[in-house]
Amino acid sequence: MHGLLVRGFTLIEVLVALAVVGVALLAAVRASGTMAQTNTELRLRLLAQLSADNRIAELRAANAFPPIGVRSAACPQGKANLQCVEEVKSTPNPLFRRIEVRVYSANESGDHMLAELIGILPRRQ
């Protein structure tokens, strides 16, 4: 039996290989979770940008010349509950108003702004 050649893996080699595979799978699961969270955030930001754009388009379509000040209103987009904060400012030319629309998630508390859009509205004669 002295000349017998044994082929195969030792228990230590198998355990090391399992540990390496486990670490790789853990990294893959973590990466997919991060991608899903990022995808959700990007979708919410896109909807917020659409809400801000819609608000400025509504003001332009109505030929509105809003008074200076800050207003807040719900601006849902799809299933997303969003809150629009509209700030109207004067410009050096009194025939124009600067509109800043900031969109926040209505479900979250805090100052996590999802989108901001700035537009200029003319006074219609």
Image (cartoon, rainbow, N blue to C red):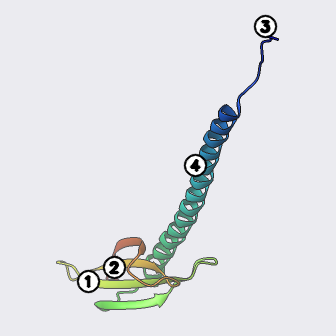
Residue sitting at the far right: 1
Mark-to-mark CA distance, 1 and 3: 93 Å
Residue 99 tag number: 2
Under mark 1, the amino acid is: Lys
Q: Which residue is mark 4?
A: 27
Work out whether mark 4 precedes mark 1 in sequence or the reverse, and give the earlier one: 4
Residue 13, how many percent across, how many down? 66, 32
Image quadrant occupied by the C terminus = bottom left
Q: Which residue is mark 3?
A: 3
99 left or right, relative to 7: left
Q: Is residue 3 above or below residue 18?
A: above
Mark-to-mark CA distance, 1 and 2: 6 Å
Q: Secondary structure at mark 3?
A: loop
97 left or right, relative to 39: left
Under mark 4, the amino acid is: Ala
Residue sitting at the far top: 3
Work out whether mark 1 precedes mark 3 in sequence or the reverse, and give the earlier one: 3
